[in-house]
Image: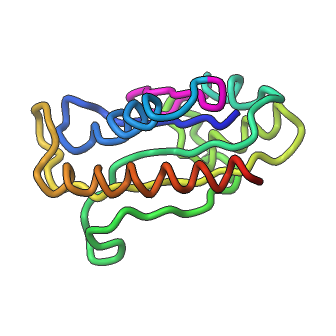
Amino acid sequence: MIVLIGYGNPLRRDDGVGPVLARMIGTRCRPGDLRVLTPHQLVPELAEGLAEKDVTAVLFLDARVNDDEGGAKVTVHPVSGAAPSPAFGHHFSPAELLLYAELLRGSPLPAWQVSVPGDDFGFGEGLSCRTEKSLAAACDMLENFLIFLSRQ
């Protein structure tokens, strides 16, 4: 089973694109092959679900500030478990959450970060026009990526 974690705050405009994308993909794929989670932020409690033996991969879906480095394109990068910061908090990065899941399961877990560029992170609901367009491209790309992963 592949776990999609679409995280972000839907009350901060484009920051909510992760949960929107996760739900869109969830409606297009067979439920048995995919588990969709849509928390506002990554928290340590999610590690237990990722550590289950039937989980074969995890994809973290989130917004990022539209900058020169990533440009206006959706990006996909592998994630590997990383040591947590010394200050234990309630908000984790994908790498920190993955590390905890791998410690619980006793083996590595393939993972990727899918980032959708966002322009408007102010208070409010709904996505900006540019992020809405990126969302459609992200959905198509992610469906193809999931097909690729399911064949591995």
Residue at left offset 11%, top offset 52%: 129
Depth check: give the residue in front, 89 or 92: 92
Report whether 42 appears left or right of 45. left
The image shows residue 8, relative to residue 49, as above or below, that is below
Report whether 88 appears left or right of 54. left
The image shows residue 94, relative to residue 76, as above or below, that is above
Report the quarter where the N terminus lies: top right
Whole-percent x, y for residue 115 in the image: 40, 56
Whole-percent x, y for residue 50 in the image: 69, 31
Depth check: give the residue in front, 113 or 33: 33
Report the quarter where the C terminus lies: bottom right
Whole-percent x, y for residue 21 in the image: 37, 40
Report whether 78 appears left or right of 124. right
Q: Which residues are drawn in magenta? A: 32-44
The colour scheme is rainbow
Residue at left offset 62%, top offset 61%: 78
**From this viewpoint, which residue is outermost toward the right?**
106
